[in-house]
Image (cartoon, rainbow, N blue to C red):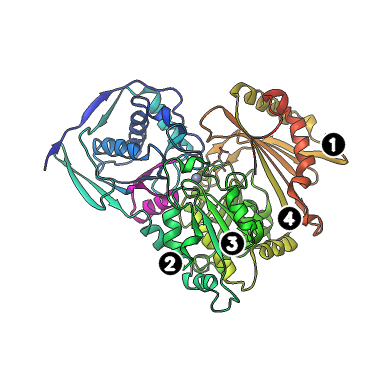
Amino acid sequence: MEVLQINTIATEPYQGQKPGTSGLRKTVKEFQKPNYTENFVQSIISTVAASAKLDGALLIVGGDGRYYCQDAVRIIAKICAAHKVGKLIIGQNGIFSTPAVSNLIRKTKALGGIILTASHNPGGPNADFGIKYNISNGGPAPDGFTNKIYEYTKTIRAYNMVNNLNVELERLGTQKFLVEGLPFEVEIIDSVADYAALMRELFDFNKIRELLQGTGPHPAPFQVFFDSLHGVTGPYVRRIFCMELSAPESSASNAEPLPDFGGEHPDPNLTYAHKLVEKMKEGIYDFGAAFDGDGDRNMILGKNGFFVTPSDSLAVLAANAHFIPYFQKNGLKGFARSMPTAGAIDRVSESMAKEFFEVPTGWKYFGNLMDAGRLSLCGEESFGTGSDHIREKDGVWTAIAWLSILANKPGESVESIVVDHWTKFGRNFFTRYDYENCEDAGAKAMMDHLNALVKDPALTGKSYADGDKTFTVAKADNFSYKDPVDGSVSENQGIRVVFKDGSRIVFRISGTGSTGSTIRLYGDCYEPDQVKQKMDAGFILKPLINVALAMSKLTHFTGRDAPTVIT
Ligand code: G1P
Ligand code: ZN
């Protein structure tokens, strides 16, 4: 076997390689700059090496198939080979969904994993790319870890790689190398098999098959439709829903992963997954789901396009978790949601007397609670739901979880389950306005203004009116979170104003955008009245949003008079 040499290459630091909510996300063009990707990967590896034994270690590598994924995988392999990493497990053609990587890290007891994705951001040579490190519990690296990566990127002067390492990403099986006398191995595996096996363990596939086929207690076949938005989930949908659960092939749409996602935003919401909404409005299908680029997000729809908000989806899953075999077996620990997520789950948690956590935005905050055995089920308003079966949110899992519940309620629909839920617990109306790519200075000035406002004790008790609605401030702050497991504190996690009637507004700057500043404005209110529960969410929330806009002077600071996306 040819003995490969390690090459040391001089480099200069790049500004701004600071990982955000979920890894480093920048434009592809940025990642293609000389040494840009190499610098960041070397900084990850240096950080890992500083805290664990890298010699002979196993790492998992894969991504959502977007443009530049395979180039990045090759760079990672070359750099890992130069740092005595023992083995990489890589998805065929460099493809793994984010939940699949999380599962594999746990299953193989790997030291960690590197995921190539910019999640729901567009892909292609003129769009976005991203690199994220997950630790040995399968979850995204915590702030302390990513801060260290950032520190390395600021001082890096050289990186080590094995220039001549050529990995064949399409060939399944093990490829062995010798690097300056030490063995280095790459195993290319089927991207779906391990994840599908996990789903079979968690759920009762026979029962779901009966639902889809209209056998057993079910009056008719339950028609399902999945939109993978040309992201990574296509092969997962085909294998799990079509091959194993017997949904027809035609129910898997946009199931070919494309490097540019067909030129669209692979983001499962009412704006970007509008084709699924239109399909569902035809009234043929009983259940629809869309997933994002890397497969961790989901949107759930019922017949005629009935939209389940992510906050409601989480609450319904929690209230019906006893139908899911995994929870039957392992018991239900606590529940959690991110701070801006509407409080529908809070009441379910209370009714079941479960421990409950409100954490900052970003899945990484759930991991410690899960590892400590205190959290079973959690979610975010940004179309993320999941459980402690892995340490990432999980789009396909959520769709199977919904089908499990439906399989246990013969004759019921998505809508009837949600409406029953509102009748029992009340309804939370929720909306999010995104102002994408604002100028940094304006966004910062607005947040400074809001920070000053919520610090002023005179704000409490102050009233704001819109039309005939008046909102009186009960409490306002910039959210800070103390992790109950490790005691770490995360400050400045979003401005929140809570009004006397329980409604809330939240402002924060996105940590995942690749250019400029994206302002997110969240509004939620609670409605116990069954007549009002049936009303349009946009209509109900309008006065609250108007008050938020007045308080923040958003238009004044940013020049924007309308959001770019409403979810
Ligand atoms: C967004 C979402 C957040 C999610 C993250 C990664 O982050 O708001 O809930 O965890 O993407 O999918 P943001 O851009 O708001 O920082
Ligand atoms: Zn994602």
> Residue at left 69%, top 57%?
347
Query: Disc 1 versus disc 2: distance between alpha carbons?
Result: 55 Å
Disc 1 residue type? Answer: Ala
98 within the magenta span: yes
Secondary structure beneath disc 4?
strand
Query: Disc 2 versus disc 4: distance between alpha carbons?
Result: 35 Å
Residues under numbered marks 1 and 2 in contact, where contact means CB atoms less than 8 Å apart: no
x then y, percent, for residue 29: 42, 28
The disc label shown at residue 465, or none: 1
Q: Which residues are magenta?
A: 93-117
Does residue 451 appear left or right of residue 134 in this picture?
right
> Residue at left 57%, top 34%?
510
Q: Point out the tag, 3 or 4, that comes first from the N-terminus.
A: 3
Q: Residue furthest bottom?
A: 216
Q: Quadrant of the C terminus?
A: top right
Reading the image, the residue beneath label 3 is 287
**Residue situated in front as seen by the camera: 412 or 144:** 412
x then y, percent, for residue 493: 60, 36
x then y, percent, for residue 176: 19, 47
Does residue 180 appear left or right of residue 543 in this picture?
left
> Residue at left 52%, top 69%?
328
Does residue 71 appear left or right of residue 517 in this picture?
left
Disc 3 residue type? Answer: Phe
Disc 2 residue type? Answer: Glu
Is 39 rendered above or below residue 498? above
Disc 4 residue type? Answer: Arg
Badge 2 crowding class, 10 Å Cα cut-off, few under 14, some 14 to 19, many 20 or more, is some
Reading the image, the residue beneath label 4 is 427
Badge 3 crowding class, 10 Å Cα cut-off, few under 14, some 14 to 19, many 20 or more, is many
Q: Point out the tag, 3 or 1, that comes first from the N-terminus.
A: 3
Query: Disc 3 versus disc 4: distance between alpha carbons?
Result: 21 Å
Reading the image, the residue beneath label 2 is 244
